[in-house]
Amino acid sequence: MSIYIFDFDGTLVDSMRQWGEKMTNVLDTHGISYPSDIIKIITPLGDRGTAEYFIKNLGLDMTVNEILELMDSCALKVYADEIPAKEGVSETLSTLKARGHSLNVLTASPHRMLDVCLKRIGIFSLFDNVWSCDDFNATKSDPNIYKEAAKLLGTVPPDCIFADDNINACRTAKLAGMKVIGVFDESSADCVPEMKQLCDRYIYKFKELL
């Protein structure tokens, strides 16, 4: 049996455009300039971590809760009603589950968007654990979150396979000792060469896991 830990946005579901828009909308609404690679920077941070980054690093004059409310107003309905699974995800996960593998989710997205989306597309029940960074009070840029996830699974990081489309999350999971699979997403297409060097394996289509 293998133990898989999957990212959510950009890995299981085709949501990186909408996820990015909910984040940059906050900055655009308040006339805050930001670096061109802002999405890569904030992707591992989660909603709360991103809000804190906006305040501390970009000077956004809002409270964390005000930023979270604005993010939600932009994205909650989209996650609940529209965002689809990426090609081959449902079939591949079902096959892996039938083969006896442990399937888990670890994502920066909050449960209020994560759970409703996974349930709507019919794959929530395939997972042994569905974790948000909020459950650990940490971000995916912290190696300890991967170590803690492995501990909760009753194992150690080298016995876990972590799959993500974000290079920073892949790098940190690798640092924590996990085997890492890089997953292609259009939002990170410019990182493919570096991802291939960093990861133990790189896939373009989810069904390649089989």
Image (spheres, helix red, strand yellow):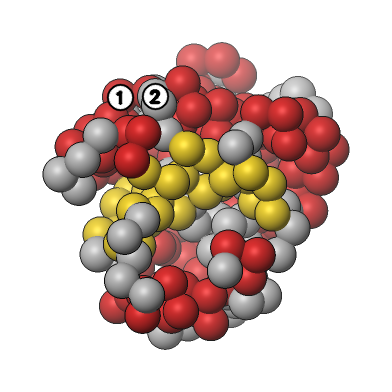
**Quadrant holding the N terminus:** bottom left
Q: Is residue 124 above or below residue 148?
A: below
- Labels 1, 2: front one: 2
Q: Is residue 121 visible?
A: yes
The front one of 162 and 106 is 162
Question: Mark 1 = which residue?
Answer: 144
Residue 100 drawn at (x, y percent): 31, 71
Image side of residue 114 versus residue 1, left or right = right
Identify the residue shown where x is 36% and y is 56%: 2
Identity, as a three-letter code, of the amino acid under mark 1 = Asn
Residue 127 drawn at (x, y percent): 31, 68
Identify the residue shown where x is 49% and y is 28%: 174
Dividing the picture into quarters, in which one does residue 105 lie?
A: bottom left
Identify the residue shown where x is 82% and y is 34%: 193
Label 2 sits on a secondary structure element that is loop
Residue 42 drawn at (x, y percent): 57, 32
For residue 176, which numbered disc appears in the image? 2
